[in-house]
Amino acid sequence: MAMYRANRPVDLKTGEDLEQDLNNLREQIEKDLYEVNQRQTTQKLKDIPNPKLHQIISFVKSAIRIVFSFVGIIGFYELGFFGLLLAEIVGIYEELV
């Protein structure tokens, strides 16, 4: 149905037309949100640390602590403290992986 306003035709939409437009708009918004969600999920998966590498570094850190603790116990205190310092540095790297 067309009406004329200021000598120009103006289309009036029926309720069904408006409802269809609203459904089309809703579908487009849901599609766009789904695509954004998928991109964010993919990015989050890329940001997850490597659990296997984290575990290996943790075991290495523990081994360093154990070995150098025994070194300190048998009397080489400076070397024992150096080993514990080294283990802490490895621990910092472990948290970055």
Image (tube, rainbow, N blue to C red):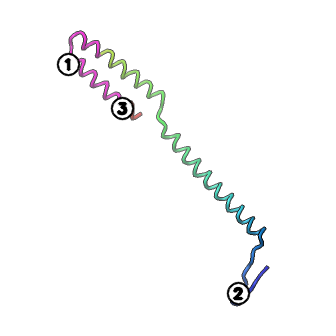
Residue at mark 3 to residue at mark 1: CA–CA distance: 23 Å
Q: Position of residue 5 (x, y in %)?
A: 70, 87
Of labels 1 and 2, the one closer to you: 2
The residue that disc 3 covers is: 93
Q: Earlier in the sequence, mark 3 or mark 1?
A: 1
Helix, strand or loop for disc 1:
helix
* Residue at left offset 57%, top offset 52%: 36
The residue that disc 1 covers is: 78
Q: Residue furthest top?
A: 74
64 shown above or below 25: above
Helix, strand or loop for disc 3:
helix
Residue interval drawn in magenta? 68-91
* Residue at left offset 27%, top offset 25%: 85
Image mark for residue 70: none
Tell me the amino acid under the disc marked 3.
Tyr
* Residue at left offset 24%, top offset 22%: 82
Answer yes or no: do the residues labelled 3 and 2 have beta carbons within 8 Å? Answer: no
90 shown above or below 36: above
How many circles with numbers are drawn on the protein?
3
* Residue at left offset 21%, top offset 16%: 77
**Residue 71 falls in which quadrant of the image?**
top left
The residue that disc 2 covers is: 5
Q: Earlier in the sequence, mark 1 or mark 2?
A: 2
Tell me the amino acid under the disc marked 1.
Glu
Tell me the amino acid under the disc marked 2.
Arg
Of labels 3 and 2, the one closer to you: 2
Q: Is residue 83 magenta?
A: yes
Looking at the figure, which quarter contains the N terminus? bottom right
Helix, strand or loop for disc 2:
strand
Q: Earlier in the sequence, mark 3 or mark 2?
A: 2
